[in-house]
Image: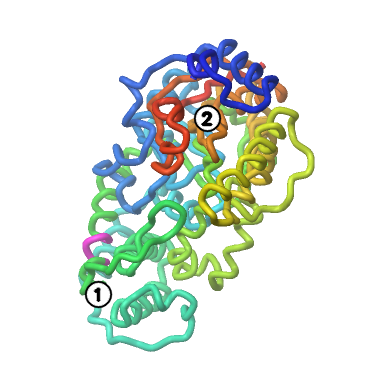
């Protein structure tokens, strides 16, 4: 990016261009793509126990977490924190390696599955679970109005079988056993539906599942095998709490600091400012899992989330340079609309999203600082993005904002190049091989 900024004026504002170039020169930027290019996405977890239960598009690999914990210098018995826990990779890896694992996620579905992964189950509980799966009845299709909001996303047969299966699980007397089987249920909803997670939501793909019961049994066996083989290897303790990352320190103080437990390091990958509404991707599980009463009820979670998607509440105050980036995007939109002949209602909402996103992220980084003692590290896995040709160098901006809330920037580690859309690349060829996914390494001062 440094070369591009030196070679051509890519921002309308010369002051902004100079500021971004100064950041690029000031921070130590290490190219470790040979080491981390595959570790910053979830695909490396495909065959790893625990991590392959639920198809989670966002996230990073367990190997990356292991390496960052080791590099951080965290001591065994300290707390490894992830304020955007997702499917629980960070706290699960921490617990498997002798640390306390503490995650927060605003998505209660994610927190639920992560907690099941970190529990230690007795042989009696696992055997009871196996017997319930082995003796699973042949379900008669049953009609219900309870989940009408999501009925249209399934074949009638699959929907009715899922409803019967859910009712069966809800009536299991042993709560801990019930949690395991509910996890298996949640993990088969996507494949049993006519939708697949893709980009900003769900796309229509006809299901290949003709027997929900068989798919559930196979998933339950997979989960039970993992729990049986690894439950005794959990060397630490872990939990994931469904809450906003903006409440990180309050929760850490109450649950850990009050017990004289110290934070070893913080590792997280926040939502990227890419206008994706991640709740849209998981709405079937959120409703079928009774985390939300209906699709409308999911809005309560959106209100607590980082403003990384369009349609968020207005952000009036923002940092000077964030504001200039937002203004440049705003000015470029009419030019695009004139070329295409179409009004771009979605991109028109991006400038406010950008301002809201960085305001939220600075507060969350401040919360991280409150949890850490001097010298302790925070790692943020993030990628850069671009809108109508305007580059949003998220890693540089988060590093800059971190310095304002008590952190020193140790380095920015480039993990791999990231892509923009083909349409944007055609209009702005300079974006090719410029955007990067990276790890921002911060030290508490």
Q: Residue 311, how many percent across, how many down?
A: 64, 55
Q: Residue at x 34, y 52 (%)?
A: 55
Q: Which secondary structure is most common in the magenta stretch?
A: helix
Q: Nearer the viewer, mark 1 or mark 2?
A: 2
Relative height, residue 67 to residue 40 (above, below): above
Sequence order check, earlier mark of 1 and 2: 1
Give the residue pinned by disc 2.
Answer: 380
Q: From what the image shows, is residue 4 above or below residue 175?
A: above
- Across and down, in percent, residue 136 comes to 25, 74
Q: Which residues are magenta?
A: 216-220
Cα–Cα span, label 1 and label 2: 44 Å
Q: Nearer the viewer, residue 1 or 241?
A: 1
Q: Residue at x 39, y 66 (%)?
A: 178
Specify few, some or many for label 2: CA neighbours under 10 Å numbering under 14, 14-19, or 20 or more. many
Kindly identify which residue carries mark 1.
136
Extreme residue toward the right, this view: 317
Q: Residue at x 51, y 47 (%)?
A: 240
Q: Is residue 380 left or right of residue 432?
A: right
What is the secondary structure assignment of the residue under circle 1? loop
Q: Which mark is residue 421?
A: none
Using the rendered image of the protein, determine whether residue 435 is visible from the camera's viewpoint.
no
Report x, y in % for residue 255. 62, 41
Which image quarter holds the C terminus? top right
Q: Residue at x 63, y 21 (%)?
A: 17
Q: Is residue 42 rendered to the left or right of residue 20? A: left
Snapshot quadrant of residue 370: top right
Front-most of 123 and 181?
181
- Quarter of the figure with residue 39: top left
Q: Is residue 138 visible?
A: yes
Q: Nearer the viewer, residue 437 or 298?
A: 437
Residue closer to the observer: 127 or 111:
111
Q: Helix or strand or loop: what does disc 2 sit on?
A: strand
């Amino acid at each position: 990016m440094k070369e591009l900024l030196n070679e051509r004026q890519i921002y309308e504002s010369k002051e902004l261009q100079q500021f971004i170039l100064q950041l690029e020169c000031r921070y130590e930027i290490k190219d470790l793509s040979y080491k981390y290019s595959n570790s910053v996405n979830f695909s490396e977890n495909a065959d790893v126990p625990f991590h392959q239960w639920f198809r989670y598009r966002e996230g990073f690999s367990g190997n990356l977490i292991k390496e960052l914990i080791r590099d951080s210098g965290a001591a065994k018995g300290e707390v490894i924190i992830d304020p955007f826990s997702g499917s629980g990779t960070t706290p699960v890896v921490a617990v498997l390696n002798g640390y306390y694992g503490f995650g927060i996620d605003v998505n209660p579905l994610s927190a639920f599955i992560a907690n099941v992964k970190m529990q230690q189950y007795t042989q009696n509980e696992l055997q009871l679970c196996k017997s319930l799966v082995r003796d699973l009845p042949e379900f008669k299709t049953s009609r219900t109005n309870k989940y009408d909001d999501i009925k249209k996303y399934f074949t009638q047969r699959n929907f009715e079988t899922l409803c019967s299966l859910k009712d069966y699980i809800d009536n299991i007397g042993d709560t801990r056993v019930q949690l395991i089987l509910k996890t298996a249920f949640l993990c088969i909803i996507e494949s049993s539906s006519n939708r697949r997670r893709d980009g900003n939501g769900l796309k229509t793909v006809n299901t290949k599942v003709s027997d929900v019961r068989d798919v559930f049994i196979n998933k339950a066996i997979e989960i039970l095998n993992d729990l049986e083989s690894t439950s005794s290897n959990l060397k630490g303790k872990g939990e994931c709490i469904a809450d906003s990352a903006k409440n990180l320190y309050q929760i850490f103080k109450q649950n850990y600091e009050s017990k004289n437990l110290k934070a070893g390091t913080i590792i997280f990958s926040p939502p990227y400012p890419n206008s994706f509404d991640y709740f849209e991707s998981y709405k079937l599980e959120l409703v079928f899992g009774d985390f939300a009463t209906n699709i409308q009820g999911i809005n309560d979670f959106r209100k607590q989330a980082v403003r990384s998607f369009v349609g968020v509440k207005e952000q009036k105050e923002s940092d000077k340079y964030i504001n200039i980036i937002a203004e440049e995007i705003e000015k470029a939109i009419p030019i695009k609309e004139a070329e295409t002949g179409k009004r771009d209602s979605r991109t028109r909402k991006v400038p406010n999203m950008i301002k809201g996103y960085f305001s939220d992220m600075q507060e969350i980084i401040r919360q991280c600082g409150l949890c850490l003692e001097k010298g302790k590290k925070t790692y943020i896995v993030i990628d850069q993005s671009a809108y109508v040709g305007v580059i949003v160098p998220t890693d540089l901006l988060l590093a800059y904002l971190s310095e304002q809330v008590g952190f020193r920037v140790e380095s920015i580690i480039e993990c791999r190049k990231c892509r923009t859309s083909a349409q944007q690349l055609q209009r702005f060829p300079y974006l090719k091989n410029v955007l990067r996914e990276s790890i921002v390494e911060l030290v508490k001062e």
